[in-house]
Amino acid sequence: MGRLEDLKRNIEEYFQSAELLFKQGLNNAAFMMYFKTLVAVADYTLWRDLRVLPDNHRERFRLLRPRYPDLYNVLSHYFPYYRDTYTKRVDERLLIAVRSDVIRLKEKVE
């Protein structure tokens, strides 16, 4: 199986995990998995189009910003909340918003 297919499978696995956690009311864990889904969508897109995989979030943001502004904006918007999940609780409105963005961006993966 190729790298692109592996990345696509990761997107689906993270999303399915997020959905299960969401349905169980485990908001922080669900948010973390939705964010991982966004990162996987970003990595899939970067590999598909540029044949590059970033080593960290800083490099990922640097690559996304000029080429994929929508994906960059969504990912950078949720990144501080992702970091906060280690010490704070995720608000349900934020969880619903990230879920909606994930669903919208995930549909673009083909």
Image (cartoon, rainbow, N blue to C red):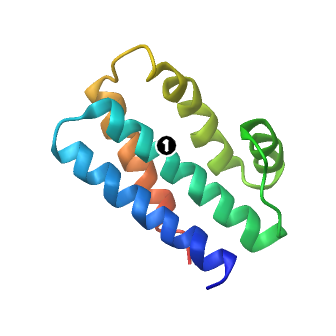
The number of callouts visible is 1
Farthest top residue? 87
Q: Which amino acid, mark 1?
A: Phe
Q: Answer above or below: position of 85 versus 57.
A: above
Q: Residue 29: percent from the left, percent from the top?
A: 34, 36
Q: Which x, y percent locates residue 49?
A: 78, 71
Furthest residue toward front: 1
Q: SS class of the residue under badge 1? A: helix
Q: Is residue 86 left or right of residue 61?
A: left
Please tell me which residue is depicted at 43% across the width and 38% down the height of the picture: 32
Residue at the image point whose x is 54% and y is 24% from the top: 83
Hey, which residue is sitting farthest left in the picture? 24
In the picture of the structure, the residue carrying the numbered disc 1 is 35
Q: Is residue 54 above or below residue 76?
A: below
Other-residue count near label 1 (Cα within 10 Å), few / some / many at <14 / 14–19 / ≥20 = many
8 in relation to 14, above or below = below
Q: Nearer the viewer, residue 22 or 76?
A: 22
Residue 92 drawn at (x, y percent): 26, 28
* Residue 15, picture quadrant: bottom left
Q: Residue at x 71, y 48 (%)?
A: 69
Judge whether 41 appears above or below 9 on screen.
above
Residue shown at the point (18%, 36%) measured from the top left: 25
Which quadrant does the C terminus fall into?
bottom right
Q: Position of residue 88 (x, y in %)?
A: 39, 14
Camera-nearest residue between 86 and 39:
86
For the view shown, which residue lies furthest in the bottom direction? 1
Question: Which quadrant holds the N terminus?
Answer: bottom right
Horizontal side of 95 relative to 68 (left or right) equals left
